Amino acid sequence: MLITKSEIIKYLKDVPPVPESVKACLDYLKEGELKKAAIEADKDIVLKKQIESVVNSAAFALPNRVEDTIQLFSMIGLEMAKSLVYSYLVKLLEPKEWKLFKFDFRDFQAAFMKNYEEFMILEFGEEVYKNYSEIGAIVPAAVCVCDELLGSKKEDLEIIMNSAPLEYGTLLKRMSGASLFGLAARIAEVWGVDKNRAEVLKKSECDSCSDAVAALVHLLFFYLTSKKHFMEINSLIEFKPECINLIPKTYERILNDS
């Protein structure tokens, strides 16, 4: 095993804790206080810039650029605002220099959050989405961790891949015993996300595909990373086609959009 469990634990322990300004912002969002949450977000310049960057990206397709945080929160709603604040924590995890994957991570992050919201509401309704909204921000964080873990062993990876054409997800499991969604669940735990959400992230591997929300997360990751500009990270998971049986509305929407 080229990546030890202790290396993974050490890296996850280095995941930055939630800053006080972000905690305050999240607390107000949980209370439904959008305006107060926006005022807290404005106190942290990096958080404010992250929110502006994601919401003004192509994934959200706003007609004009918006920089006022209160206006942005009002436009996107409570649950997406929560996801955006968690996306700021993802920024703290993002490698300063990507070692393995060379793609536009910010575009992927925004697309994953936006599509996750859309498909969750389509499949289960807004109330269920509200219960699991954080997941849309946490899955991209696991991609950052995968690049760090696999990229730190890049020379070993090249030797292995030259002798046998294995996919990144398979290599991650063989080298560390970890998986993309397993890492996402660990990140969720570090950030104090409810255990039920962390459990859904673990189940998103879809080894036994019995949880509909987990099935949606699984299919969404595969769907987005099948697009040309995100194809580089497609092999981080092994797609389980049986997941589509649990989420017929999402599957139909994806087919219609293809």
Image (spheres, helix red, strand yellow):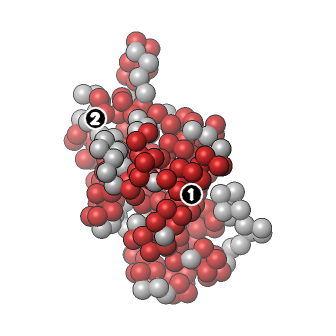
In the displayed structure, 196 sits above or below 229; it is: below
Q: Residue furthest top?
A: 163
Amino acid type of the residue that numbered disc 1 sits on in the rendered structure: Asn
Judge left or right: residue 54 versus residue 171: right
**Residue 190 percent across, percent down from the top left:** 30, 60
Residue displayed at 54% across by 44% down: 223
Picture coordinates of residue 45 (x, y %)?
57, 71
Helix, strand or loop for disc 1: helix
Residue 240 falls left or right of residue 61: left
- Which residue, as the protein is rendered here, is positioned at the far right? 64
Mark 1 sits on what residue? 115
Residue 232 sits in which quadrant? Answer: top right
Of the numbered discs 2 and 1, the one sitting upstream in the chain is 1
Q: Quadrant location of residue 104?
A: top right
Image quarter in which the C terminus is found = top right
Is residue 135 in view from this perspective?
yes
Other-residue count near label 2 (Cα within 10 Å), few / some / many at <14 / 14–19 / ≥20: some
